[in-house]
Amino acid sequence: MSENTTTNAGDAVPAQRTASEPLMRVEGLAKHFPVKAGFPIKRTVGAVKAVDGLTFDVFPGESLGLVGESGCGKSTTGRLITRLMEPTGGRIDYAGRDITHAGRKELAPIRSEIQMIFQDPYASLNPRQTVGTIISSPMEINGINPPGGREKKVRELLETVGLNPEHYNRFPHEFSGGQRQRIGVARALALEPKLIVADEPVSALDVSIQAQVVNLLQNLQRDLGIAFVFIAHDLAVVRHFSERVAVMYLGKIVEIADRDSLYNRPRHPYTHALLSAVPEPDLDAGSRERIRLAGDVPSPINPPSGCRFRTRCWKAQEKCATEEPPLVQLSGNAEGHLTACHFPEEPTIKADKEVILDPALASLESDSE
Ligand SMILES: Nc1ncnc2c1ncn2[C@@H]1O[C@H](COP(=O)(O)OP(=O)(O)OP(=O)(O)O)[C@@H](O)[C@H]1O
Ligand code: SF4
Ligand SMILES: [Mg+2]
């Protein structure tokens, strides 16, 4: 029997957030990349449905985590909402303005307010430019002259991200991976953004360095009131950083909730499986239930009918193949905890299913509490 539902995704605003209007509102967002074949004339024969109908809000100053396996559409979502890419469907409102198909001119005033931090600190910095040039270039492109000049601002930014301002004239290769990512963070901060989309900002770094960079981002978010969309495949990192978390599978959000609700009461089988896969810090693995997902992620060119997770779901029934489950609030869930499943998990809290963090990140979590 399927669960009773009380609200739908359109009403997905947790009580504590109704006071503030969303900074960004995303509705039914889609990106289908055409697949071409044929010779000599190439024709469109299908589409990669990389992002296929996402609805979520980002509130001022909050951190929203976006997690899911490789290829589920996280980076594409990041590029769409920063408008580095044009959506093929849906709508993006930023600060009350429709920016879904806004052109270069219309986007100009908000370009500075929405910034992106990229996954690879090696590839995302021009090796021929000095750190000073890299960090000041967004100001130059946008014609911004801060009081005291750009160089002074860059030196301040270097200090903000924990780097030596004297290193202004150094080149990226003279820095470690973690330091390079700090340069990327300084560049994103240069225009005093209101929203930063961080696409796996620490996954290329050592775990010990990851913790430092996550801590830096968290402090910046708190001190500067910047909203973050934090993309990761690692639930432990997201738990540390994000107050709300959205779980994606094959181009769709399958569950979205406040952190504690999602981690303690996951209702979607996929979320449950992802949580069970978080690494153990000790060898006492026998006390936790482990779920191993069978099979590979299906192709986004031809996703399964009904529920996209059904080919790997141990709870799948006939209805799952014929009816797509809507993203709704199930009875018994906290407000704003939405799940897309016909046969969800029980809303029980079990200590043995608690997420166990990587030790380096766990120490940060206890520092921040
Ligand atoms: N420019 C493109 N043209 C065609 N297909 C694309 C393009 N960019 C991404 N895709 C496809 O869209 C899907 C989603 O890709 P995306 O990079 O958003 O995933 P992701 O969740 O960020 O994965 P990862 O965790 O590996 O970074 C993938 O199947 C990918 O192959
Ligand atoms: S709708 Fe069906 S296949 Fe999809 S997650 Fe729920 S039980 Fe599994
Ligand atoms: Mg990606």
Image (cartoon, rainbow, N blue to C red):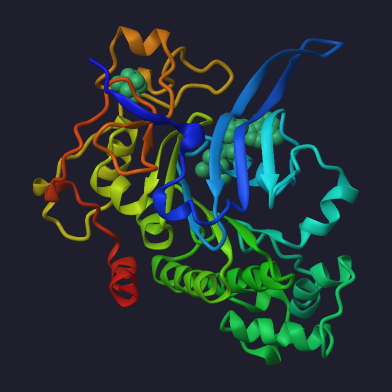
Looking at this view, name the residue that lies furthest to the front: 19
Q: Residue at x 40, y 65 (%)?
A: 207
Q: Residue at x 66, y 19 (%)?
A: 47
Q: Residue at x 39, y 27 (%)?
A: 340
203 left or right of 37?
Answer: left
Question: Which corner quadrant of the figure contains ligand 3?
Answer: top right
Q: Is residue 312 visible?
A: no
Q: Residue at x 52, y 22 (%)?
A: 299
Is 215 rendered above or below residue 123? below
Camera-nearest residue between 48 and 196:
196
Residue 108, position as x, y percentages in the image? 85, 55
129 left or right of 46?
Answer: right
Q: Is residue 158 visible?
A: yes
Residue 304, position as x, y percentages in the image? 46, 15
280 left or right of 42?
Answer: left
Residue 215, position as x, y percentages in the image? 45, 72
Camera-nearest residue between 325 and 122:
325
215 left or right of 132?
Answer: left
Is 188 rendered above or below residue 20? below
